[in-house]
Image: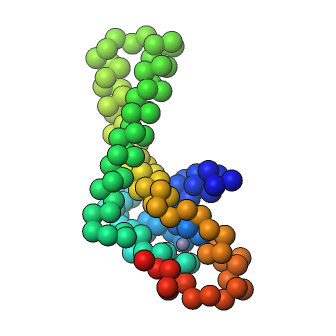
Amino acid sequence: MLLFRMLYSTFANKCSRCNEGDVFKSKNPYNLKRMFEMHTHCSNCGLKYEKETSFFYGAMYVSYAISSGWFIIWYIIQNYLLNWDLLTFAFFVSGFILIVSPLTMRWSRIIWLNFFYKYKKEFSKKNKSCNFNTSEYAS
Ligand SMILES: [Zn+2]
């Protein structure tokens, strides 16, 4: 179930801890002017997304893994179905990875957040009735 929560948080642009507050300000990853703009805190549970300076540099490792995954998928498709020459394949994969890079950047940051802040049911809105102070969990 935790994997489902992590996937939901990643693909729906939601906070990793409560799965409700938005992480990025723009819902559209291809809004290139605002693609890097993130909320500083979760609007629902108050989680501070950038827990320390340069926290999201680590997301580059996740981004590298995702891009490698795209390459491997396309390499398998190329070998068994397409059989293009190497130069055509290289241009196609480079273009594809460039086109999906805004998505890859978002996914990698949210996956990185999920490594440090797992989903906890008590932070979701449905459990606000327990009435505890979320600000003490903000950092
Ligand atoms: Zn949250």
Q: Position of residue 120 (x, y in %)?
A: 62, 68
Q: Position of residue 22 (x, y in %)?
A: 51, 68
Residue lying at 55% horizontally and 67% vertically, measured from the top left: 17
Q: Quadrant of residue 86?
A: top left
Residue lying at 51% horizontally and 13% vertically, measured from the top left: 81
Residue lying at 39% horizontally and 46% vertically, measured from the top left: 62
Residue 15 horizontal side relative to residue 100, left or right:
right
Q: Nearer the viewer, residue 135 or 75?
A: 135
The quadrant of the rendering that contains the C terminus is bottom left
| Quadrant field for ligand 1 | bottom right
Q: Position of residue 87 (x, y in %)?
A: 28, 17
Q: Quadrant of residue 34?
A: bottom left
Q: Position of residue 113 (x, y in %)?
A: 45, 60
Q: Nearer the viewer, residue 60 or 78?
A: 60
Residue 85 horizontal side relative to residue 5, left or right:
left
- Asked if one can make out residue 28 in the rendered structure from this viewpoint, the answer is no
Q: Is residue 18 above or below residue 107?
A: below
